């Protein structure tokens, strides 16, 4: 079935409280998607963000960002009041997330709600909370203690904690659980509330015929509960990385990209039947309808950079688990829908892996227009088992991208897409959207910024940079009825649902 969808982070939803959340605005956005003839909402990773605010560098693979807990839902429970919410500064701009303001305010508000919930002692809530804790015992206590200890150590990475906590000596952990019992329960409770609010949003979307595409990074952050609680999963020696992840130098980056994420100890994972991965993927299939796996090529071969390093020049390619991981997943978890992020330079073996899994790969139209080149990203070269995007969260907005094209590339794009000379700026992205919808790809996903014809200020992320990223938010009312009709017309014209 041919389908159409929108890419927009939860954080980008309109909200009175500084950042998009699991609120009535999320359900209103779902209603807009339905009116626009869409059946997919693709989001960015939901995990708790840390330094740099990237959802791809999270404190936990399994946890949900507490920022997404909706204050108005907490008001409806009687745990906080509107006056409580108005005490805080949530940031000055309605189209940007001020992460410093949100960080300073959100946890104070959530602490008030937690204290009130405990005092209220609702038996139904208590029972549901205990059930949630039991169901998530394989990750929740470690995550909650990790966060409590980070707070106690002024946010320092676990590698800088005292030795007995850093290496997780049993006695030290028992003492810490006892000492920080209230703080641990607080973080567990936030996960309980975030999970049930997200379930309500997802259930609403599913009832309206909208499927959620979730995004999981291939790697975890070094400063994460995953790395701290299970160092055996990674290439560590004495709790320090032996090598870290990144990308080799290319025409755009002479030093390559040094991501710094710990690399997996794949022989150990294989010995355990990929137990941790089965838990991770199983959890993802519970909270999303379709899972997009970032940097899919890393399962075929991953770039290993000796630690420590100043750049990625001295790395090497090492063979990954290949199809064995996905064979195990299909046997243990069933044949769930997955999107393979297979962008960038692809070797023959990566292409074989994607083909063997049967998962659709990705096509990005912004990569297509290099004058004189018959690119794989031009729609006439697609095959149906693909997902086409105008751009992704790592790309510029289509309007800004187009304005920055070299003259020869722009001429090619104009000719291929049928863009008339002196076309209005706001119409430019719609030629790309039309090309995506008209393509044979079974799924077409368009970033919300392109539907709104926004310029470069609305870009979500500049890869390999810190600061100013992940901040864009849609203004309330921006997704107008007219834009919804325009998308619906395209969806109907090209038989997308």
Image: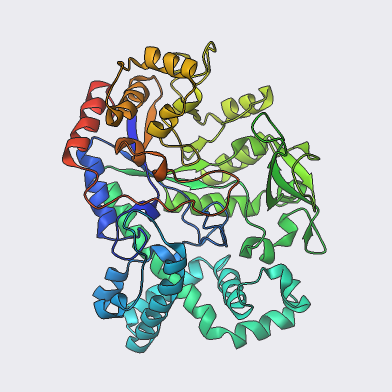
Where in the figure is residue 352, as x and y percent of width and height? 63, 24
Residue shown at 57% from the left, 72% from the top? 147
Where in the figure is residue 426, as x and y percent of width and height? 28, 31
- Would you say residue 417 is visible in this rendering? yes
- Residue in the foreground of this view, choosing between 288 and 21: 21
Q: Quadrant of the N terminus?
A: top left
- Would you say residue 81 is visible in this rendering? no
Residue shown at 72% from the left, 49% from the top? 263
Where in the figure is residue 221, as x and y percent of width and height? 63, 56
Q: Is residue 176 left or right of residue 24?
A: right
Residue shown at 39% from the left, 26% from the top? 442
Please, is residue 294 above or below residue 139 in the view? above
Q: Quadrant of residue 444?
A: top left
Where in the figure is residue 300, as x and y percent of width and height? 68, 34
- Residue in the foreground of this view, choosing between 397 and 308: 397
Please, is residue 175 above or below residue 416 in the view? below
């Amino acid at each position: 079935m041919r389908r159409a969808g929108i890419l927009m982070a939860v954080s980008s939803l309109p909200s009175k409280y500084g950042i998009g959340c699991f609120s009535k605005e999320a359900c209103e956005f779902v209603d807009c998607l339905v009116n626009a003839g869409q059946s997919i909402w693709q989001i960015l990773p939901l995990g708790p963000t840390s330094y740099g605010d990237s959802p791809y560098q999270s404190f936990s693979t399994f946890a949900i960002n507490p920022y997404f807990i909706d204050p108005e839902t907490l008001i409806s429970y009687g745990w906080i009041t509107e006056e409580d919410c108005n005490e805080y500064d949530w940031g000055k701009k309605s189209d940007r997330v001020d992460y410093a303001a949100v960080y300073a305010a959100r946890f104070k508000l959530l602490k008030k709600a937690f204290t009130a919930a405990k005092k209220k002692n609702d038996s139904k809530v208590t029972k549901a909370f205990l059930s949630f804790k039991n169901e998530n015992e394989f990750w929740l206590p470690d995550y909650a203690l990790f966060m409590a200890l980070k707070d106690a150590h002024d946010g320092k990475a676990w590698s800088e904690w005292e030795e007995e906590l850093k290496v997780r000596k049993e006695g030290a952990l028992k003492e810490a659980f006892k000492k920080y019992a209230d703080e641990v329960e607080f973080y567990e409770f936030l996960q309980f509330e975030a999970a049930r609010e997200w379930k309500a949003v997802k259930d609403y979307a599913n009832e309206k015929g909208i499927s959620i595409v979730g995004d999981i990074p291939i790697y975890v952050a070094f400063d994460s509960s995953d790395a701290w609680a299970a160092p055996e999963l990674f290439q560590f020696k004495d709790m320090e990385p032996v090598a870290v992840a990144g990308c080799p130098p290319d025409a755009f980056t002479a030093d390559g990209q040094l991501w710094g994420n710990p690399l997996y100890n794949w022989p150990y994972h294989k010995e355990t039947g990929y137990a941790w991965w089965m838990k991770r993927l199983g959890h993802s299939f519970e909270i999303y309808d379709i899972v997009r796996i970032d940097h899919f090529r890393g399962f075929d071969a991953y770039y290993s950079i000796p630690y420590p390093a100043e750049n990625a020049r001295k790395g090497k390619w090492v063979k990954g688990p290949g199809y064995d991981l996905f064979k195990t997943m299909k046997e243990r978890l069933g044949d769930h829908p997955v999107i393979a992020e297979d962008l960038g330079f692809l070797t023959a073996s990566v292409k074989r892996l994607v083909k063997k899994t049967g998962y659709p790969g990705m096509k990005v139209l912004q990569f297509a227009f290099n004058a004189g080149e018959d690119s794989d990203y031009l729609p006439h070269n697609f095959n149906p088992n693909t997902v086409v995007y105008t751009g992704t969260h790592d790309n510029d907005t289509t309007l800004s991208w187009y304005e920055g094209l070299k003259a020869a590339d722009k001429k090619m794009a104009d000719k291929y897409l049928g863009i008339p000379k002196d076309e209005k700026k706001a119409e430019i992205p719609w030629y790309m959207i039309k090309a995506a919808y008209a393509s044979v790809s079974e799924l077409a996903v368009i970033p919300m910024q392109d539907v709104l014809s926004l310029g470069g200020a609305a870009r979500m992320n500049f890869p390999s940079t810190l600061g100013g990223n992940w901040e864009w938010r849609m203004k309330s009312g921006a997704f107008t009825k007219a834009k919804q009709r325009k998308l619906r017309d395209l969806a109907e014209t090209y038989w997308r649902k």
